[in-house]
Amino acid sequence: QVQLVESGGGFVQPGGSLRLSCAASRNIFAIYAMNWYRQAPGNQRELVAALIRGGITNYADSVKGRFTISRDNAKNMVFLQMNSLKPEDTAVYYCNAAGADREYDWWGQGTQVTVSS
């Protein structure tokens, strides 16, 4: 089991930036995928960015070119740099650690991101 704790959410104006952090309770080197999901009110949870062991990244089309996922295995942390934020990025953002076949699937408690003028 890995406990995940997100931080870095907040209120930002359109066009602004935020950096979300996810701190893991133990070493994440062996974890297959570290992911960021988000869920807006009334919507299903959606995958925003994934970082697969070996360095492969995947992004939702809506955030490509604006968001960047990274991980620091030495510090057991995962980050989501979000630039050029839009009101439609408003959501609760969740950190997720998952196995290739979801044989493990751990979630943080989420952090709120609000983009508004």
Image (cartoon, rainbow, N blue to C red):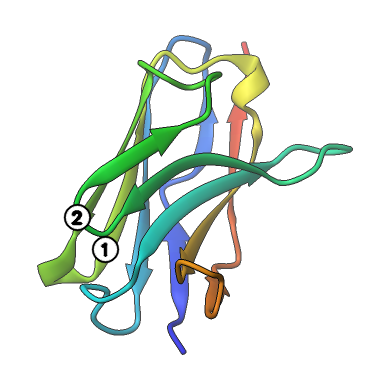
Q: Which residue is mark 1?
A: 77
> Which disc is residue 96 wearing?
none
Q: Position of residue 30 (x, y in %)?
A: 25, 76
Identify the amino acid type marked 1.
Met
Task: Using the rendered view, name the quadrant where residue 90 is placed.
Answer: top right
Please report the residue visible at 55 percent of the width from the left and 19 percent of the height from the top.
62
Rendered position, 108 above or below 52: below
Q: Quadrant of the C terminus?
A: top right
Rendered position, 87 above or below 113: above
Tags 1 and 2 in contact by the CB under 8 Å rule? no
Q: Position of residue 68 (x, y in %)?
A: 31, 32
Please report the residue visible at 75 percent of the width from the left and 37 percent of the height from the top.
40
Q: Residue furthest front?
A: 101
Q: Is residue 75 left or right of residue 57?
A: left
Label 1 environment density (alpha carbons within 10 Å; few <14, some 14–19, many ≥20): many
Total labels: the figure holds 2
Q: Is residue 107 left or right of residue 70?
A: right
Please report the residue visible at 53 percent of the width from the left and 69 percent of the height from the top.
101
Q: Position of residue 71 (x, y in %)?
A: 23, 54
> Which disc is residue 54 wearing?
2
Q: In what element is the residue under mark 2?
A: loop
